[in-house]
Amino acid sequence: MMPSACLALTTRRTLLGLALLATPILAAATGAPATPAAPAPAADPAPFVERALAFDGIRLAGQPAAADFATIKAAGVTRVISLRTPAERATLGFDDAAAARDAGLAYADLPIDGSGGFTPEVLDAFSKAMAEGGGDLLLHCGSGARAGQLYAAWLVRERGLSPQEAMQRVAPLGLWPLPMERMLNRPLELRLATPGSPEPPPPPPPAAPAR
């Protein structure tokens, strides 16, 4: 073979080798990105009983799901008081009273309908239920707020706590600090008025709009 032919053959082989070597590099640089790894599955939410605010003999919480009543029973709770109104319960999609009783829990309704539902009679009924005993109690509403307010009032009347101490107990339910404290960025002090002290004057009527 002539020297020029050998040189041409060698050159072609060299170029072919370089092309084969460059192919995977170009593919890695310009090809479709690698399929990302599947995200790790989200952790299961904490069981209902772990999300509830627990004190000695009572748990305060929002609305349990139908499947939660079995775990509530397994956690040592024996009775349930719901503060939800009939209209609220009608939207649940299941019979919560039946679900509680099917799980072996005693069930009672003590509905509180908005802020106007916080009456001395409601506190009397709750105090009676607490005094009767019968095992650990789940006191719940929709979010836990009404349950916390009722329990705080019980702590003041039946356990002698100051209103501020009682509200601080239920702070994890979002009831303390008060919204006014957050807005003013200053602590407020809650205390009971002295018996016989005059009622605070009503707020003045809103001013008429300027014409």
Image: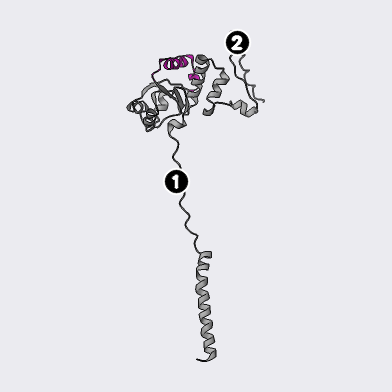
Q: Amino acid at mark 1?
A: Pro
Task: Work out whether 99 lies above or below 162.
Answer: below
- 2 or 1: tag closer to the N-terminus: 1
- Residue drawn at x 40%, y 17% as measured from the top left: 133
Q: Which residue is at the far right?
A: 210
Secondary structure found at label 2: loop
- The residue indicated by pointer 1 is 41
Main secondary structure type of the part rendered in magenta: helix
Q: Is residue 132 magenta?
A: yes
Q: Which residues are magenta?
A: 114-134
Q: Position of residue 168 (x, y in %)?
A: 56, 24
Quadrant location of residue 86?
A: top left
Q: Which residue shows up at 45% across the image and 51% down it?
A: 38
- Mark 1 burial class by Cα count in 10 Å: few <14, some 14-19, many 20+: few
Q: Position of residue 108 (x, y in %)?
A: 38, 21
Locate the C terminus by quadrant. Answer: top right
Q: Which residue reaches farthest top? A: 196
Mark 1 residue element: loop
Residue visible at 47% across and 53% down in the picture? 37
Q: CA distance from mark 2 to mark 1?
A: 57 Å
Name the residue nearer the viewer: 181 or 19: 19
* Residue in view at x 56 percent, y 26 percent: 176
Residue 67: horizontal and vertical position, in percent?
37, 33
Q: Quadrant of residue 161?
A: top right
Task: Return the residue at label 2.
Answer: 194
Instruction: Pick the residue in front: 69 or 117.
Output: 69
